[in-house]
Image: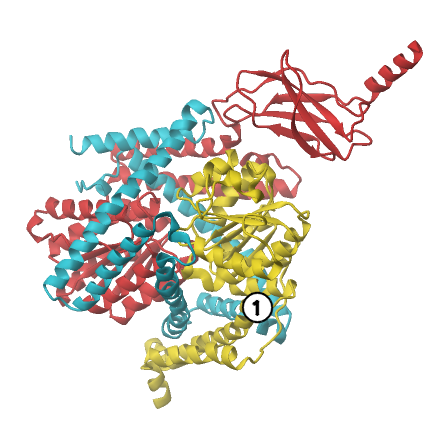
Chain colours: A red, B cyan, C yellow
Amino acid sequence: MLFAVLLLASLSSASAIPLQASDTPNDGGGSITLHWTDPSAPPPRWTVVRRERGGTFAPLATIDGKLQTYEDDTAQPGTAYEYQLVALPTDPLLDSDISAPTQAIANWFDGTKLNVLVVAGLFFLLLFYYIFQAERGTRWTFRKIAGLDAIEEAIGRATEMGKGVFYIPGVQDIDDIQTIASMILLSKVSRMSAKYETGLLVPTNSPGVYTVAEEVVKSAYADVGRSDAYRSDQVRYITSEQFAYVAAVNGMMLRERPAANMLLGAFFAESLLLAETGHSVGAIQIAGTANVHQMPFFVVACDYTLIGEEYYAASALLSNDSRLLGSLKASDTVKILLITVIVLGAILMTFGQTWLWDFFATQ
Amino acid sequence: MKREIPMIITMVAGLFMLIAFFVPHPAVRHLYEGFQIWVIVVVGCTYVLGVANLLRINWRQVARREQDWPYKIVLIAGLLVTMAVGFSEGTHYTDVTSGFQWIYQTFYSPMSSTMFALLAFFIASAAFRAFRIRSVEAMLLAIAAFILMLGRVPLGNAIHPAIPAAADWLMEIPQNAAKRGILIGAALGVMATGIRLILGLEKTYGGDGS
Amino acid sequence: MSVLSALRSLDRRWIFLGVALLVIAPLVFGFHIAPVLPSHRSKGYYDAIERVPEGSTVLFAGDYDPGTSAENYPMALATARHLMRRNLKIVALELYPAGPPLMDQVFRIAGAEYNKRANVDYVNLGYKVGNEIVMSSMGTSIPATFPVDNNGVPVTQIPVMKGIQNFQQIKLIVSVSAGYPGTKEWVQQVVSRFHVPMVAGVTAVSAPEYYPYLQAGQLQGLLGGMAGAAEYEVLLHKPALATRGMDAQSLAHVFIAFMIILGNLAFLPQRKKERS
């Protein structure tokens, strides 16, 4: 009898797979990860059971028998838990060991984002460096972007023809960075329009954009001493529905027949509809977007197109402020570094060295 | 202070959101997610201003009998009727037989699809008007365009199976590579713009042109 | 030369008429240009749904509105048919405010064909504002994010929602999307965090944006525009809207290619003058 019990115990300990429980890294607490090695004959399913120290086991989840890892995201931070895998159908010989008590800990830094932190940190350092250089009097040369030079020319053309300028700030809301960049450019365009006494119309797709655009245009007119020329219906909220907005703006273009159209912001399917209608009324068109899928339409249908980072750089280039230009210099430098990393990474991968690729891999 | 207070709010909120991106701890994460919800609430409140502006401008154009003023009446009537129907039906506005759904299916849905369908016509006219082969690069672009246009429809495969294979290769290799380059540049532009805003270097979006 | 000068001053409304006739003709007269051949991307989409065990729950995100329904609706309908044919439970939601009626229509049609009942075999949780916040909130609790369905019924009373807490109970995510918010956000917020398999149907113009996700394995399959929907219909052996539309699309593409050639021919003398 004693021999049978000892044999059973030894069989159990021989077959019981070790179960490791550890805090799931890079999270806000509340998660514990279980790891185990694959037994030679796993059951069809496991029941994961859990208990607090001194408590009784309760089932947590049923998982596939082929798995070797499980994440418990219902753990309370600060509470120590023990886990066990119970075979389904029941077979005590297959059950795992009981894991050591483990607590879920909230982390203060997500290590999987270290690569992003490195690049962002580098960018910040370079930015401060170039701003410091700018304040010491260093000047850089940037290539001419035809579309930016054409803005003032387009407004001048509109003034000569006695027609207006349409400024279309895209179809995304004010929380989109492209729309914010558009508002910055709107300020500059408004100042030019106010100075030249050219009519400016800004139809907006979102009430949030409308409120910001109204303030931008009003302030721009005030800054050049032309508050009297500002009209409250220059900035209008049309509708938030994409194609209803396009229909309305196209109608406005056909009625008002502007001499210049500026399509600067985030655009989607409506880009060609707007650009073709603008062309049909004879307007000179300057477009700028970072939406890659709409760039071909703008390149074909508009006179000038700001592509991707040219659009974001526009405000800095138009302002000619050396500190803003310093930020352009920083992004150019980071781009060169990234190109170097890409080339280096491709060479390393060719020779089976994956550490650089692993570092830059996203989640 | 009219200029400084918005700048300070921008800087504090921007830096917090930037730092919170890297911090999973609940002490920070709850506020991070809270901020995102506040944005939705604030933007929702601006709808009141937007609708008021819409009504004010269009009503004024009707009153002054400006160009195409009858259409402004249609717009105002459509807005008010749809709002009235939707509010009167309460939570039943999603029912298949509701008046709101009738307006949606009869007016909004077909009109939206029609506007999208206009793209087909405009693409053809833009292709005729503006696609000029003036250089070697433009010639390559035109050849790629022909291969893709044929490769993306069954006709291309009927002509030769190599056409859709070539179209797939063009989209998966050179197109992807060029697009990733543009995206990397745009992403750096986003970073630069964002940092300029957070640090207060760029102020004009808030109405301060100086 | 007078032909070329006539071409140079061609009223674009003739071009519009040409497009209209070429698109309408195959749809009205029903003639067939060429058979649709499924691509590896649409096969991946089909196979991913085939691999889901019968009786499992699939999350169906119908993130589109009437503007893109010409491309997204056929793929959504074909997907619903496929999911129902495989007896998979469907939990649907929309991140576009105008999306719910479109998904209701899809489920009504497919549900009638496959004898599936609302709330028992599928549920439409409706629209929720918040974009990415909705997605990450669902990772914690789907019932808390959507306490009621599109008709105001508490999800605790809906049979198909029984046992559905978060993404751990979801075997596949299907995203039919028009843009933002949509497939990219689902991949970034859900697939990379919760490792749920995902397939996507998107508009043709935005399909190339998702090729990197397909190559990286974050998407198991991709339908691009009406062509992708047609390929999927062929795989399902149920040709429908998209398949019929491909004949019209074939002619339209040929016409546009012809317009490029014609446009360049028309301006050839002008270019010669510029050069000299």
The foreground one among C237 and C147 is C147
Residue A195, percent from left and from top: 11, 53
C139 vs A266, left or right, is right
Q: Nearer the viewer, residue A314 or A205?
A: A205
x then y, percent, for residue C125: 48, 46
**Is A24 left or right of B48, judged from the image as shown?**
right
Mark 1: amino acid: Ala
- Where residue C178 sits: x, y (%)? 45, 55
Say which quarter of the image contains residue A167.
bottom left
Count the numbered circles shown: 1
Subunit ID for the residue under disc 1:
C
Residue A102, relative to residue A224: is it above or below?
Answer: above
Quadrant of residue B27 in the image? top left
**Quarter of the figure with the N terminus of chain B:** top left
Kindly give the residue lying farthest to the top in the view shown.
A2
- Left or right, B51 with respect to B150, comes to left
C168 or C158, which is in the foreground? C158
Q: Is residue A139 above or below residue B71?
A: above
Q: Which residue is mark 1?
A: C240
In terms of secondary structure, where does tag 1 sit?
A: loop
Q: Is residue C140 visible?
A: yes
| Local crowd size for mark 1, using a 10 Å CA cut-off: few (<14), some (14–19), many (≥20) | some
Q: Residue furthest bottom?
A: C2
For residue B58, which quarter of the picture? bottom left
Q: Residue at horizontal 61%, vertical 46%?
A: C217
Quadrant of the rendering where the C terminus of chain B is positioned: top left
Q: Position of residue A234 (x, y in %)?
A: 16, 55
Is any part of residue A184 visible from this angle?
no
For residue A317, above or below residue A126: below
